[in-house]
Image (cartoon, helix red, strand yellow):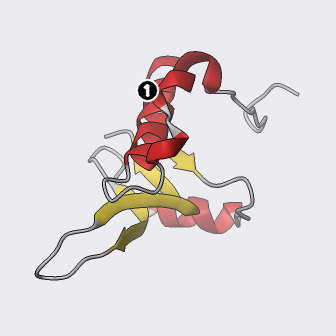
Amino acid sequence: ADGPKAIKIVDLSIEFGDAVNPELESTSQGSGHCSKMQSLLKHLHKHVPGRRWYIVVDDDTLLNVPMLLRVLDSHDDTKPLYIGERYGWGHREERSGTNYATTGAGMALSAG
């Protein structure tokens, strides 16, 4: 159904399939995860402009939408903002690891 509450599933492989290399998923550089996120953000920028917030979640994430909207309304979406869980492994003073925003718990990106 169309309308403001319609949910649309988008297959990014048509546009960005070559950008995501599964062999890079588990490397210390985290390139596979970064490639997927870059592809998703490019798609949103190109095809879904003008939103206050962009919400990205994994396919098995459950959302409390009324609570999510209350939380988002408490932040200034005109400024660049990321709300979500940071994922990192291998972080120690003597060594760096990978560090990226994970979508597992969900993330919100302001349009600002």
Q: Residue at x 42, y 38 (%)?
A: 35
**Towards the viewer: 108 or 94:** 94
Image position, residue 98 (x, y; %) = 31, 63
In this view, 107 is above or below 21: below
Q: Residue at x 37, y 45 (%)?
A: 31
Q: Which residue is mark 1?
A: 42
Q: Quadrant of residue 100?
A: bottom left
Q: Quarter of the image containing the N terminus?
A: top right
**Towards the viewer: 76 or 20:** 20
In this view, 31 is above or below 48: below
Pick out the residue farthest to the front.
Answer: 23
Q: Is residue 42 visible?
A: yes
In this view, 23 is above or below 30: above
Q: Quarter of the image containing the C terminus?
A: top left
Image position, residue 11 (x, y; %) = 69, 27
User: Left or right: where does residue 100 sit relative to residue 25?
Assistant: left
Does dot 1 land on a helix, a strand or a loop? helix
